[in-house]
Image: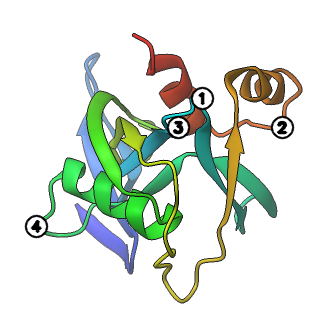
Amino acid sequence: MKRVYNGFLKVDLVDINLKRGGTAQREILRCKDAVAVLCRKPNGHYVFVKQYRAPVGKDIIEVIAGGVENGETPEFCAIREVEEETGHNVLAITKIGEMLPSPGYSSETIHLYLAEIDENAGPQFLDKDEEIEIVCFEENDFNQFVYDGTITDAKTLLCWYRRSL
């Protein structure tokens, strides 16, 4: 293994043994695990965030998400992210799965949660580089946004699908 980049993200160049014999070289993006949280208010509305995502050059509507910090459990991270990004208190939280967003080149696992949150939001506690708009939808609205291509984020779609399993 050779580390070829060592920043927030890390990139390793590794040799792997192929099942049919021989070896191949792979670039692996190493990053910390993350959480994605679908939030539901008592009135049945779902809370999402809308924010600019530089890699795709546009605003994206997505579930609340963030990286698991050293020493945190994914569940603790999920609760912290909801409270920071939305200002809502988490009343109950349930793990609904995990996903591997890009296992062909990335080691990242995203832990998926469904959070029941209180009705009224307090202040957001955003990082200095975050600009997040809160958006709320009823189930039918969300389904229409999926259908018309407004919502395309994979972690958001998987949380939505897994919410009722």
Secondary structure beneath dot 1 equals: helix
Q: Which residue is mark 1?
A: 157
Secondary structure beneath dot 2 equals: loop
Provide residue 106's location: percent of width, then percent of height.
41, 48
For image coordinates 53% across by 18% down, the residue present is 161
Provide residue 56's location: percent of width, then percent of height.
76, 58
For image coordinates 73% across by 29% down, the residue present is 142
Label 1 close to label 2 by CB (< 8 Å): no
Apparent side of residue 61 relative to residue 88 in the rendered image (left or right): right
Question: Furthest-top residue in view?
Answer: 165
Q: Which residue is mark 2?
A: 150
Q: Earlier in the sequence, mark 3 or mark 4?
A: 4
Q: Which mark is residue 71?
A: 4
Amino acid type, residue under disc 4 in the picture: Gly
Rate crowding at label 3 as few (under 14), some (14 to 19) or many (20 or more) other CA atoms within 10 Å: many
For image coordinates 45% across by 58% down, the residue present is 88
Q: CA distance from mark 1 to mark 2?
A: 11 Å
Q: Is residue 32 visible?
A: no
